[in-house]
Image (cartoon, helix red, strand yellow):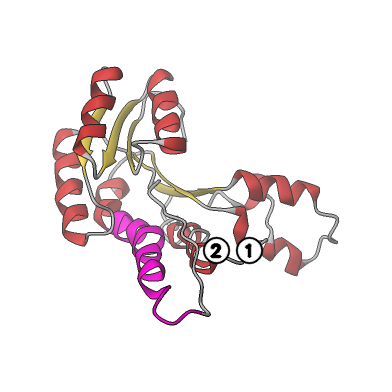
Amino acid sequence: MRINGTTIFIPGATSGIGLALAIRLHDAGNRVIIGGRRTELLADIAAQHPGIDTIRIDTTDAASITTAANEVIARHPDLNVLVPMAGIMRAEDWTTPGSFLEDAEATLATNLLGPIRLISAFIEHLLAQPDATIMTVSSGLAFAPLRPTPTYNATRPRSISSARRCGCSSKARAWGSSSSCRRRCRATSSPDTAMTRQRCPSMSTSTRR
């Protein structure tokens, strides 16, 4: 992926890491479109960072994703990078009946179905671009799970494997990123076997497909 001169849509970038990434990419010379649910945050971002475009999208709502995708493509026909950033992390107590199902379902809708639906909405357009990229965001908790957040542990890393399935075309590359996984892979003393490579692949050789 080129880090300048591209047109990038980042749904889920109204705060935190997503917003920081969007601003950095904009400053590097890219056209950046931020997507989010809260229109007041989108308006503030657009006012504080001239040149960044914004669009309302709820990545847990399939209809909202379809509407936003059509609008983004219409406004930015040269769009060639998709970075699904939206994600939630909620503690779940599976020992208390009735206390965890709603949070688990919300996490699935945001962390797993959201990226899959986004990729589905944009893949036809991206495949038509001469140089396109889908970059998803994962977590090191895939390898060292946090006990209070079982659904997050299971769903956030899965967005990478979903995106990689789109990487069969030379026109659209799928990337996954997890800084904590990179650190853990470099630090591990496990032997270099087929099993360890599958469980914790080297980010320099296995992330890009």
Q: Disc number at residue 145?
A: 1
How many numbered discs?
A: 2
Q: Looking at the picture, which amino acid does disc 2 mark?
A: Asn
Task: Please give the name of the residue rendered at 29% of the width and 18% of the height, measured from the top-left corner.
Answer: 48
Can residue 133 be seen? Answer: yes
Q: Secondary structure at mark 2?
A: helix
Q: Which residue is mark 2?
A: 153
Quick one: 90 or 98, which is closer to the camera?
A: 98
Task: Please give the name of the residue rendered at 22% of the width and 53% of the height, measured from the top-left corner.
Answer: 65
43 sits left or right of 129 in the view: left
Q: Main secondary structure of the magenta part?
A: helix
Quarter of the image for residue 144 reads bottom right
Quarter of the image for residue 64 reads bottom left
Task: Please give the name of the residue rendered at 38% of the width and 38% of the height, measured from the top-left corner.
Answer: 131
Quarter of the image for residue 102 reads bottom left
Q: Are marks 1 and 2 in contact (CB under 8 Å)?
A: yes
141 sits left or right of 94 in the view: right
Spot occupied by residue 87 in the image (x, y as percentages of width and height): 41, 52
The stretch of residues the image draws in magenta is 96-120
**Who comes first in sequence, dot 1 or dot 2?**
1
Q: Disc number at residue 204?
A: none
Q: Looking at the picture, which amino acid does disc 1 mark?
A: Pro
Spot occupied by residue 62 in the image (x, y as percentages of width and height): 21, 61
Quick one: 101 or 118, which is closer to the camera?
A: 101
The CA distance from mark 1 to mark 2 is 6 Å
